[in-house]
Amino acid sequence: MKTVTLEVKNDKDLELLYMLAERLGIHVVDEARSEEDLAKARAIVEAGVTNMTEARLNEMLLWLEEGRADRELPFEAR
C-alpha cells in the first residue's frame, strides 16, 4: 500500500480528484476529517464514564452474559 498526500486549493479540483479516485477504486482518507474524528474520540475516552465502578461494570457484563446465554449460535462452541 502506498500513501500519497495532495494539497488542493480549489474545491472544484478536489471534487474532480474524489470522482477520479472513486472511478479508479482508490480509497481516499481526508486527513483533516480524520484528525477531527480522532480528537472527538479522545475527548470521549478522556472524559470517561461517570459513576463507573468495577462492581457496576461487572453487573453490566453479567447482564450481557445472561441475555446471551440462551442464544443459538451458528457454530459449535469450543
Image: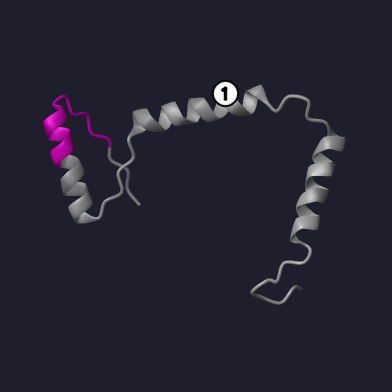
Q: Position of residue 71 (x, y in %)?
A: 72, 67
Name the outermost residue toward the bottom.
76
Q: Is residue 22 above or below residue 50?
A: below
What coloring was used for the rendering? one colour
Q: Tell me the magenta residue range.
A: 5-16
Front residue (pair 55, 31): 55
Q: Position of residue 15 (x, y in %)?
A: 17, 37
Instruction: Count residues near mark 1 (Cα–Cα under 10 Å), then give few for <14, some for 14-19, many for 20+.
Output: few
Question: What quarter of the picture does the C terminus occupy?
Answer: bottom right
Front residue (pair 22, 8): 22
Residue ID at (78%, 30%): 52
Q: Position of residue 36 (x, y in %)?
A: 43, 26
Residue ID at (20%, 42%): 18
Residue ID at (68%, 26%): 48
Q: Position of residue 22 (x, y in %)?
A: 22, 50
> For this view, does 68 lie left or right of residue 10?
right
Q: Is residue 69 magenta?
A: no
Q: Quadrant of residue 16?
A: top left
Residue under label 1 = 43
Numbered disc 1: secondary structure: helix
Q: Is residue 8 magenta?
A: yes
> For this view, does 45 lie left or right of residue 57?
left
Q: Amino acid at mark 1?
A: Ala
> For this view, does 47 lie left or right of residue 33?
right
Q: Is residue 3 above or below residue 70?
A: above
What count of labels does the image hold?
Answer: 1
